[in-house]
Image (cartoon, grey):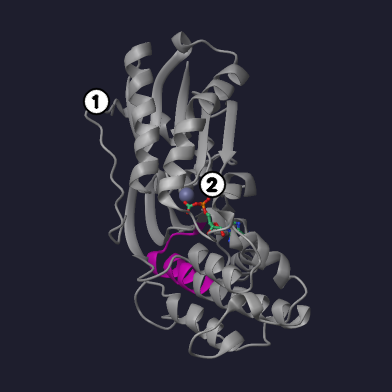
Amino acid sequence: MALLTIETTCDETAAAVIDRDGRVLGSAVATQERLHERFTGVVPEIASRAHVERILPVIDTAISQAGISPRGLTAIGVAHTPGLAGSLLVGVVAAKALAVAWRRPLVAINHLYAHLFACQMSQAQSVYPCIGLIVSGGHTSLYHARGPLDLEYLGGTIDDAAGEAFDKVAAMLRLGFPGGPAVSRCAATGNPKAYDFPRGMIHDRSYDFSFSGLKTAFRYAIAGPGKVDFETLDLSPQTRADLCASFQAAVVDCLVTKSCRAVRERGVNRLCVGGGVAANPALRSTLLESATRHGFRLVIAPPELCTDNAVMGAIGWELVRRGEFADLGLDVIPGLQRGY
Ligand code: KG4
Ligand code: ZN
């Protein structure tokens, strides 16, 4: 009895095999970082082509690691929303083809719910109900999660996602892609108070976020307004470190302030954090300090389950238990509207 899970929402091609108790029997992730590096961002067309090339070998690896035959699979789970349309399609079409060939049912996984469920994977007790912060390259959203599949949207970014802001700042400093880990490494020797960057919407009563003003302030700090050639910018290593540390502090401040407020106002004594940016050490340590100070429980997804992976697709078991299977008409929902 095992679930095969497939994840191709953005630029990671991933598959995993998970047993009924949430144990990972097999897992493979093929990253496309090298392919998108020179564009300093994910190029959708390149991403979907790369998924096509990698999807079957990745599934094969996960299944071989698990040492099971397709007969041992209870169902096939696939992330069908939200994400890049072309990328999602590759995973959904592969899942449907295998479902027909192996006569197994399909389950449709919401990628954001799965990011939050990654927090559950490291815990013996249920992490629900909780306030869920999902902070990734495509999303920055706060939820009141009453169960793995019962999420109430509280608010989210009205412009850039936090991870996207990290990636753009890294591109300006030519630190490479993905930008998050590079900015975080560069920030390690910097002064987080060197630049007073704006904390968009931090005092606003909503649970929304805004990072585009921060990105613009960063650009002005390094090059002023007007046309600029980032390739020829000459900044000292200490200036770069100070810029990164100050930028990172502003992002962390916004994320922590609104998450803690949601915990307090919703009377939920637990905060769960998932998504690629949750791998950020400064965010992790600041959240921990706040949880200790305010006395709430904090669960951050293990770093390897923060960025896109198929293991968090274990949430598919919840759908299997409820008997909520998808049919072959299952479609992708890129779902870029707010609240997703
Ligand atoms: O969850 P994820 O793999 O993909 C999406 O669903 O978007 O998140 C990728 C994002 C990228 O923007 C990347 O720069 C960011 O997560 N990220 C980080 C760190 N590691 C990855 N951001 C800040 N600090 C990190 N250590
Ligand atoms: Zn993701």
Give the label on residue 26, or none.
Answer: none
Residue at image location 40% in from the left, 62% down from the top: 142
Q: Tell me the amino acid under the disc marked 2.
A: Cys
Q: In the rendered image of this protein, does residue 13 appear above or below residue 269? A: above
State which image quarter holds ligand 1. bottom right
Crowding near pointer 1: few (<14 within 10 Å), some, many (20+)? few
Locate residue 8 relative to residue 96 in the image: left or right.
right
Locate residue 93 relative to residue 3 in the image: left or right.
left
Q: Secondary structure at mark 2?
A: helix
Crowding near pointer 2: few (<14 within 10 Å), some, many (20+)? many
Give the label on residue 327, or none.
Answer: 1
Query: Is 233 in the magenta?
Result: no
Query: Is 258 in the magenta?
Result: yes
Q: Secondary structure at mark 1?
A: loop
Q: CA distance from mark 2 to mark 1?
A: 28 Å
Residue interval drawn in magenta: 256-271
Quick check: can you spot residue 320?
A: no
Q: Nearer the viewer, residue 45 or 282?
A: 45
Give the label on residue 119, or none.
Answer: 2
